[in-house]
Structure formats: structure tokens, C-alpha cells
Image (tube, rainbow, N blue to C red):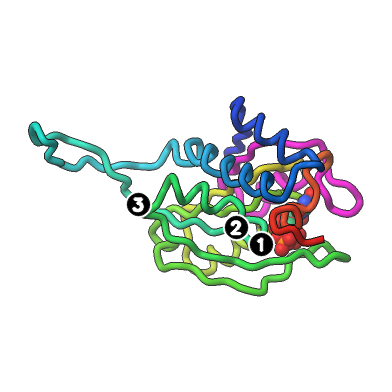
Amino acid sequence: MNKVVVLSHPLIDHKMALIRDKNTSTKSFRENVGEIGALITYEITKDLETIDIIVETPIQKTVAKQLKKSLVIVPILRAGLGMVNGIHDMIPSAKIGHVGLYRDETTLEPVTYYAKFPEDIIDGVVIVVDPMLATGGSATAAIKELKQRGAKDVRFVGLVGCPEGVARLQKDHPDVPIFLAAMDEKLNEKGYIVPGLGDCGDRLFGTK
Ligand code: PRP
Ligand code: URA
């Protein structure tokens, strides 16, 4: 069964309060989503394997550590883009893939309109990024696209989840650990997370 980690950190909680506030500007919303992405990166990478290497300091040779596997960040378009820079700042060697999905507004089912991934998804660690885990349909579909192309080591990171989305992801991809900044109460009849933060893509990009 999936590991589910709901982060508990005062800096993340403080920034989450800012992005939940409907009066927060687009600029501040975007900045804080990126900053939470950076803070979350410490937790999602905590168990990455390292290998010992020899480096020469200005004083002498010593054993140091290097990441064993390459990393690939895969934002689910659009809203996942908001977290990418923050994560990438922490892991500048990571490659970036993209998967474009939108939720059909009537059925709430995800429709894939774009997918482009680096080859490193096959042997690397893939971090799928989407701020909202609502029905779980988008995350499930994105991870399916990745697995069909050979990805084996996948983890999901989001800002706000709910029991429905976590249950769906656990059922469809029991091998994928889930990292969230907050676990909310439920989904409403329109598929929005309650209390949530509204439409994340619209708030990030100023649409609507
Ligand atoms: C939002 C969000 C997730 C999806 C989550 O995207 O960014 O991708 O909904 O919902 P789910 O768990 O029920 O699938 P949306 O479809 O609004 O597209 P956008 O990012 O382009 O705005
Ligand atoms: N997508 C969003 O942007 N917000 C929600 O609450 C649910 C899905």
C-alpha cells in the first residue's frame, strides 16, 4: 500500500494559509506555490539512494555522496507548472517531462492532450507534480502514461489532497508514494476540494 505523507511544517502551513485565501493576488499565489514546491522537495527526496564518490577538497581526498539515480520532474499541465521551478531549484540536474491533461467538466474524467518525457523516466526517479489531488483521475492517468513508457520508480507530490483522491491513487497505483502539504475534508459536487483553494490553474495563471 502507498506511503502517504502529509507534511507538517510551520513554513509550509504559513504559505498554505496564504494560497488558500481568496484575496491573495495572482503574483503572491504563484510565488507561494513555487516556494512550497521547494520546501516539499526535502521530504520527497529524503529516501533517495546515494553512492560514495571520492572528491578532492582543497585539503585532501575524501569520501562524499552523490545521487545514485537521475531525477525527472513531471508536472501535470497546467497547474503542476506552478511547483516546477521551486522543485527544480533544489534539484537543478533533474530533467523535466510534461503531461497535459484537463478534466472534462461534466464527467470529471481526465483527457490527455500532450505527453513528452525524457528517456531518464525508465531508470530514474520520477516526481509527478500536481497541486490538486481531487478525484485522483488526473494523477492516475498521468502515472499510467509514464508507466506505459517504462517508468518504474514514481512518486506523486501535491499541495492539497482529499480522501477520495488518495483512495483512487492508492487503488490504481499502490506502488506510488503520495506527498501532500495538506489533506482536506472532501470533494464537493463539482469535484472541487473542500475547503481547498479553488481552481489552482486559474489562480496561478490569472485566467477567469
Ligand atoms: C486541475 C488540477 C489537477 C486536476 C485535479 O486541473 O490541476 O490536474 O484538476 O483533479 P482530479 O484529481 O479530479 O483529476 P484542471 O483539469 O482544472 O486543468 P488545468 O490545470 O489546466 O486548469
Ligand atoms: N482542481 C482544482 O484546481 N481545484 C480543485 O479543488 C479540484 C481540482
Q: Amino acid at mark 2?
A: Leu
**Horizontal placement of 158 versus 74: left or right?**
right
Task: Report whether residue 69 is seen.
Answer: yes
Distance from the alpha carbon under mark 3 to that under mark 1: 27 Å
Residue 31 percent coordinates (x, y): 61, 46
- The residue located at (55%, 65%) in the rendering is 98
Neighbor class of circle 3 (other Cα within 10 Å; few <14, some 14-19, many 20+) is some
Q: In the rendered image, which residue does mark 1 sit on?
A: 78
Q: Nearer the viewer, residue 59 or 49?
A: 59
Residue at x-position 54% and y-position 39%: 40
The range drawn in magenta is 164-193
Q: Is residue 105 left or right of residue 183?
A: right
**Disc 3 element:** loop
Badge 2 density bin: few <14, some 14–19, many ≥20, Cα 10 Å: many
Figure quadrant, ligand 1: bottom right
The label shown at residue 69 is 3
Where's residue 205, x and y in %?
70, 59
What SS does tag 1 mark?
A: loop
What amino acid does circle 3 point to?
Answer: Lys
Q: Is residue 186 magenta?
A: yes
- Quadrant of the rendered structure where residue 207 is? bottom right
The answer to which of 138 and 194 lies nearer the viewer is 194
Which labelled disc corresponds to residue 81? 2
First in residue order: circle 3 vs circle 1? 3
